[in-house]
């Protein structure tokens, strides 16, 4: 069935908000949060740790911390609490992105059971299964993802247990990787250029003759498709079309349903004329940054983590994820009525934050609208 991706219009008179048809919490995040809070409830008195941030959302993580949960690593794998501090009595929750086989073994060796408190999203596990299928057919696994992202590190660990694997972060790196396939670049150079992105004993001279592509679940769909198509064309050019199956595993992308639906809903929303877009989510959230990227192509876009970032009707504090810095922009709202705003949020963002942003806009614009009138709009 064809899905409907037209946005919902909240017509508040001088303010018109187009809400994306799909936004916010995905199955994997909801499931992980539920397991985490249930674990806290069912284990009074026990020390509960999280391998890293549960999801990329500061509010949810702060909520968990206020319930006594402690994070062992930061987002980039930097140790905050030493593994030496753990005992077999402790509970360690594995987050929705999953973890590496090495870390899982380390915990099991300490006597800590991980199965019961493993919140790895089934859509991430699907990527691992896909890599395994590709590996069984002796293809090298190319992972399109952010090399330092927890999910990509976990996928890389699972993939490289079965086959030679290499991570490419974007099209630029893919083009460079292809030069080792075509021998335009000498194999020896590969190890420096792809440092920390290839598996142990990777042989750049041999391991790029048969390849298959998987991706981090939250990448931009168009990027992932372009990368797979590009590599396929490189293989066709090198090995002739008739033998392509021997050199390129034809698989579909491994983006998750939430990533796809949220991106398609943004494309639907962008068909509406508007003055600006507001995207709500954690600044280190991969899927949210891709929604921002889509909006930025069409109109001024403000990536904010909560309603507090709207300082007044004049000023907004927002995140530039390209430069990785927060900026202050003045006069972000146009001097006209109605002001038309497109709005969405990432898969790790609670819906309450979107509601908070809508309420904050109503407040700074001094619109006399009651909650009841607002709710009526949804009907
Ligand atoms: S964004 Fe997708 S893969 Fe990630 S937790 Fe949500 S449903 Fe799972």
Image (cartoon, rainbow, N blue to C red):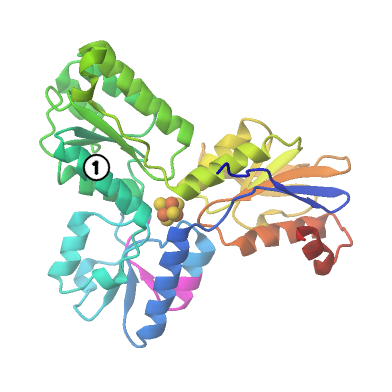
Question: Which residue shows up at 22% across the image and 67% down it?
Answer: 83
Residue furthest to the bottom in view is: 45
Q: How crowded is the residue under tag 1: few (<14 C-alpha within 10 Å), some, or many (20+)? A: many
- Does residue 23 appear in this view? yes
Question: Which residue shows up at 56% across the image and 40% down it?
Answer: 264
The quadrant holding residue 335 is top right
| Tag 1 residue | 131
- Does residue 247 appear in this view? no
The quadrant holding residue 101 is bottom left
Quarter of the picture containing the N terminus is top right
Question: Which residue shows up at 49% across the image and 50% down it?
Answer: 258
Frontmost residue, 342 versus 26: 26
Q: Quick check: is the Cβ at mark 1 less than 8 Å away from ligand 1?
A: no
Frontmost residue, 92 versus 331: 92
Residue 205 lies left or right of residue 266; in this view the side is: left
Frontmost residue, 180 versus 326: 180
Residue 104 lies left or right of residue 353; in this view the side is: left
Classify 110 as above or below 293. Answer: below
In terms of secondary structure, where does tag 1 sit? Answer: helix
Question: Which residue shows up at 31% across the image and 80% down it?
Answer: 47
Classify 131 as above or below 189. Answer: below
Q: Residue 250, how many percent across, how many down?
A: 29, 30
Which residue range is magenta in the image? 63-74
Frontmost residue, 162 versus 6: 6
Q: Residue 161, how many percent across, how many down?
A: 15, 46
Q: Residue 7, how many percent across, how many down?
A: 69, 46
Q: Is residue 70 magenta?
A: yes
């Amino acid at each position: 069935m064809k899905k409907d991706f037209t946005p919902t219009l909240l017509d508040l008179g001088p303010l018109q908000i187009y809400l994306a048809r799909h936004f916010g919490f995905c199955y994997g995040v909801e499931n992980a949060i539920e397991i985490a809070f249930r674990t806290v409830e069912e284990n009074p008195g026990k020390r509960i740790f999280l391998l890293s941030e549960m999801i990329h959302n500061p509010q949810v993580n702060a909520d968990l911390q206020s319930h006594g949960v402690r994070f062992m690593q930061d987002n980039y794998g930097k140790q905050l609490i030493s593994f030496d501090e753990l005992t077999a009595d402790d509970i360690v929750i594995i987050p929705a992105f999953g973890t590496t086989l090495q870390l899982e073994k380390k915990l099991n060796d300490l006597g800590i059971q991980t199965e019961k408190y493993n919140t790895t999203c089934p859509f991430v596990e699907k990527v691992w299964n896909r890599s395994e299928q590709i590996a069984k057919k002796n293809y090298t696994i190319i992972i399109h993802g952010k090399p330092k992202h927890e999910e990509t590190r976990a996928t890389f660990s699972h993939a490289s247990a079965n086959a030679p694997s290499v991570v490419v972060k974007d099209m630029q790196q893919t083009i460079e990787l292809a030069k080792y396939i075509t021998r335009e670049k000498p194999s020896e150079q590969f190890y420096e250029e792809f440092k920390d992105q290839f598996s142990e004993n990777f042989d750049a001279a041999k391991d790029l003759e048969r390849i298959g592509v998987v991706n981090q679940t939250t990448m931009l769909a168009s990027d992932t498709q372009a990368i797979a198509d590009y590599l396929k064309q490189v293989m066709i050019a090198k090995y002739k079309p008739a033998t392509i199956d021997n050199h390129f595993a034809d698989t579909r992308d491994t983006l998750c349903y939430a990533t796809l639906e949220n991106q398609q809903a943004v494309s639907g929303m962008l068909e509406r004329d508007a003055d600006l877009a507001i995207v709500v989510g954690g600044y280190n959230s991969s899927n949210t940054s891709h929604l921002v990227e889509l909006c930025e192509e069409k109109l001024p876009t403000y990536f904010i983590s909560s309603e507090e970032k709207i300082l007044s009707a004049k000023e907004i504090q927002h995140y530039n994820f390209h430069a990785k810095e927060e900026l202050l922009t003045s006069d972000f709202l146009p001097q006209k009525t109605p002001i038309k705003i497109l709005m969405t949020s990432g898969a790790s963002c609670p819906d309450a934050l979107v509601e908070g942003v809508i309420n904050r806009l109503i407040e700074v614009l001094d619109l006399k609208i009651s909650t009841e009138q607002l709710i009526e709009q949804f009907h």
